[in-house]
Image: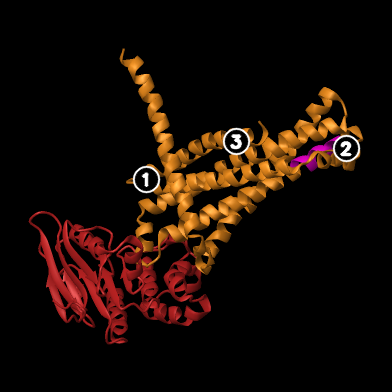
Amino acid sequence: MNHASYACVLDVAITAPHRIAFQVPAGSVCKLIVSSRDRKNELLSLLTGLAPPAAGSVQLLGEDLYAQDESQRIAVFRRVGVVPEDGGLISNLKMWENILLPSAYHHAHRVEDVEPRVVALFNDLYPDRRDLRSIMGKLPDQLSLRERRLTALVRAFLMEPDLVIYDFVLAGMDREAAARIVAATSEFQAQHRDRTSIYLCTDEGAYARVQADQTIELEH
Amino acid sequence: MSQVTLLPERIGRIFVDALRDWSATAALVRYALAHIVALRHPVVARVLYRQIYFTGIEALRAISLIALLTGIVIIVETVSLVGHQPAILGQIMLWVVVRELGPLLTGIVIIARSSSAAAAELATMKIRGEMNSLRVMGIDPMDILIVPRIVGMTLSVVAVTFYFQLTAILGGFAATSIWYGVPLRQGLQGVIDLMTVTEILASLTKALAFGIMIAATSCSFGLRAKGTVTAVPQAATGAVMRGIITLFLLDGVITYLFFV
């Protein structure tokens, strides 16, 4: 099988009777519907190279994650943006330091390089928060869930990844906030023809707004 | 019977645990040396500067006070014992402050302030999954968290040790100058006359070895944390206790190698 045209190919056995297999073509939008948060966490760990499966393989952007050593596996994630449900922020870094961390590390971006884009993104995603400057200096523990998740979203966007994995990105958001996030992620996807977006989600109504090329329901 | 057989087992376990800790510490030092080029990255360099600030600059107030009091106590006790004899005072200051107390007390202060803090911080990050967050951002947590901490703390310990020695000697002789009317320059000259390359080398070796050991021990205990939030104080306490024991062991070994 030629996997070159796929952004994500997963074929794994987690525990004895449970096997998951799916493929997500490059340049597409995919909704992965899971039955519970526990299953989602299991799947996310597999996709992010943090939990090797009992058998099988996980390929992201043509790289077999678990056939590589730790440093090679980490290198794959320079091209992958992950937006964790809880933000996945570093607790001893302020909000703006969290936003800048991966893009400064991989692309040597400075604050002045990304500031206009960050402001524009937050204006779109969080228009009811006018005093952006005041929250930028806060540590993650001082931020609301919405603020943490938007920080992770903007952080991922600045990396211009080829593949974006949205982990329950709409969970706990009100209708208006969810609509803004879907609009922003759809626009981000449309910016590059080869970019792939994977939404890990439940079958909640909020995700109906996501225009997906493929919907995969995982029932394990 | 069981208590008799348990005692050697307990002692053996203490040694096995210590060997395991030292082996993990040595592995981290090897890693830091092999990946020292990571410091050329501006983001990693910023972590290094921050570590030097927390471990070195912020410790100066406590170190100044301890060094000053140490210098004064040693000189006053010596003068009260042997009277004012510049050669003996110089010799005592050199042996006690430069050889022993400078590196040792600096090490203890850094362990109390920074080693416990670094271990707790890393343990918290590990438990909250932040190491994995760094991995999925394509950043090796060892390069950005461990290398700058080991290098930063080591450089800080060396610099702060030198500062301690200088403050203690100056403070001690300033006190004799004020209380006994002995010229400050005369006292300092006594130390300078007796200073040898071996003294400087031994002091530098101790500071460097203590710095590397303190930094790597705190990182090792922080990285070892697993599971729940109770692992955080355990990591901090473990780093402090193992650090202090190893500090005295290293001090003995280096003193033996240089002066016996």
Q: What residue did someone put label 1 on?
A: B229
Q: Is residue B125 magenta?
A: no
Where residue A64 sits in the image (x, y, percent)? 24, 68
Q: Name the mark nearer the viewer: 2 or 3.
A: 3
Q: Is residue B90 above or below residue A104?
A: above
Q: Where residue B87 appears, x then y in whole percent?
A: 85, 33
Q: Residues within 10 Å of mark 2 (few under 14, many from 20)?
A: few
Residues at marks 1 and 2, CA–CA distance in whole angstroms: 53 Å
Query: Residue A41 vs residue B48: left or right?
Result: left
Q: Main secondary structure of the magenta part?
A: helix
Question: Is residue B170 or residue A185 the one in the foreground?
Answer: B170
Chain letter for mark 2: B
**Going by the image, does A20 lie left or right of B53?**
left
Which lettered chain is shown in orange?
B
In the picture, the disc for residue B178 is 2
Residue B191 percent across, percent down from the top left: 81, 39
Say whether disc 3 or disc 1 marks the residue closer to the N-terminus: 1
